[in-house]
Image (cartoon, helix red, strand yellow):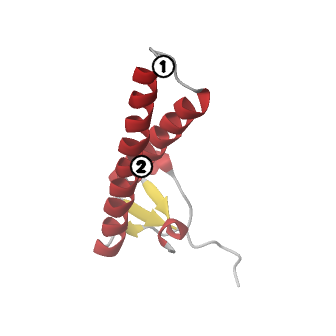
Amino acid sequence: MSGKKNTATRRKDEYEKDIDNEKIDSCMQDLLRVVEIFLAEFEEMDGDVLYSTYTKVRESTCSANHSKQVKEMPRVGPVWDFDKGVTGEYYYNV
């Protein structure tokens, strides 16, 4: 064994693209749900919101943005490399 790691990347296949789309859909549904709660709370409390509600909106927004970034990455490899647009293979091991 040479001890050399396999660093080869490849283009995403249809299965991986489908997973990307499903994750974006899931994140957007979650984001819409928590924003709806946030807006109702904002209205009921005359502009105030609970910090926990704000945190849920922030986390949902970050998840949606991450899913979007992953979808835009064209390649898959053994390790993540955001600079080169490579998603780690384990992301798709569902």
Q: Position of residue 78 (x, y in %)?
A: 55, 68
Q: Residue at x 50, y 74 (%)?
A: 94
Q: Residue furthest front?
A: 44
| Picture quarter with the N terminus | bottom right
- Nearer the observer: mark 1 or 2; the answer is 1
Depth check: 44 or 31 in front?
44
Depth check: 77 or 8 in front?
77
Q: CA distance from mark 1 to mark 2?
A: 22 Å
Q: Earlier in the sequence, mark 1 or mark 2?
A: 2
Q: Position of residue 47 (x, y in %)?
A: 45, 15
In the rendered view, tell whether residue 83 sits above or below residue 57: below
Q: Which numbered tag is attached to residue 30?
A: 2
Task: Name the residue tied to disc 1.
Answer: 45
Q: Residue at x 54, y 33 (%)?
A: 53
Q: Residues within 10 Å of mark 1 (few under 14, many from 20)?
A: few
The amino acid marked with disc number 1 is: Met
Q: Residues within 10 Å of mark 2 (few under 14, many from 20)?
A: some
Q: Residue at x 48, y 40 (%)?
A: 62
Q: Which numbered tag is attached to residue 61?
A: none
Depth check: 46 or 59 in front?
46
Q: Position of residue 45 (x, y in %)?
A: 48, 19
Q: Is there CB contact under 8 Å for labels 1 and 2? A: no
Q: Residue furthest left?
A: 14
